Amino acid sequence: MRYEAAPAAATYDSRTAASADADQSEADTNLNQNRAEQCRKELDVLKLYNKASYVKYEAEYQAIAAKTAKYMEIKDSLGSDLNYMVMPAYQFQIREFCFRVKTRLSQLVLRQAK
């Protein structure tokens, strides 16, 4: 008996991988945009519950936005290897910030419900 590799495996090429990477990158970008929009809405709602918390988080948001905007200006000039290392740091920073905003807002909303 002889076994041969399936022909489908032989037709896989780098264009297929690049297309899959591009599709995933676009999906990640859309997800990050949706998360950022939701985060901004929650930050705005925070103003209604606690002005001091809002001022604190708004200042932090502006600092993160400024750093991210600076990176986005130069991102296309960097090599993919450098972007691969740096982009997750920026993404983590905004996700962690949004988590803290969501946590604080949850505390305030729940406190009011008592």
Image (tube, rainbow, N blue to C red):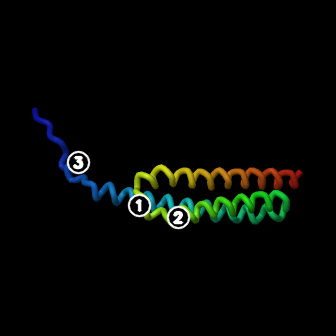
Q: Which residue is mark 2?
A: 72
First of labels 1, 3 by sequence position: 3
| Residue 53 image-quadrant placement | bottom right
Task: Identify which residue, 103 or 97, lies in the foreground.
Answer: 97
Q: What label sits on residue 71 in the rendered view?
A: none
Task: Identify which residue, 37 or 72, lies in the foreground.
Answer: 72
Circle 3: element type: helix
| Residue 79 image-quadrant placement | bottom left
Task: Identify which residue, 110 or 1, lies in the foreground.
Answer: 110
* Quadrant (top left/top right/bottom left/bottom right) for the N terminus: top left
Q: Which residue is mark 1?
A: 23
Please state which of the two labelled residues, at mark 1 or mark 3, is closer to the viewer.
1
User: Residue at coordinates 18% horizontally, 42% vertically from top-left?
Assistant: 5
Please state which of the two labelled residues, at mark 2 or mark 3, is closer to the viewer.
2
First of labels 1, 2 by sequence position: 1
The residues bearing labels 1 and 3 have C-alpha atoms spaced at a distance of 21 Å
Task: Identify which residue, 45 or 83, lies in the foreground.
Answer: 83
| Amino acid residing under circle 2 | Met
Please state which of the two labelled residues, at mark 1 or mark 2, is closer to the viewer.
2
Horizontally, residue 104 falls left or right of residue 62, namely right
Q: Which residue is mark 3?
A: 9
Give the number of callouts. Answer: 3
Circle 2: element type: helix
The residues bearing labels 2 and 3 have C-alpha atoms spaced at a distance of 37 Å
The residues bearing labels 1 and 2 have C-alpha atoms spaced at a distance of 20 Å
| Amino acid residing under circle 3 | Ala
Residue situated furthest left in the rendering: 1
Horizontally, residue 98 falls left or right of residue 19, namely right
Give coordinates of residue 59: x percent, y percent: 74, 61
| Amino acid residing under circle 1 | Asp
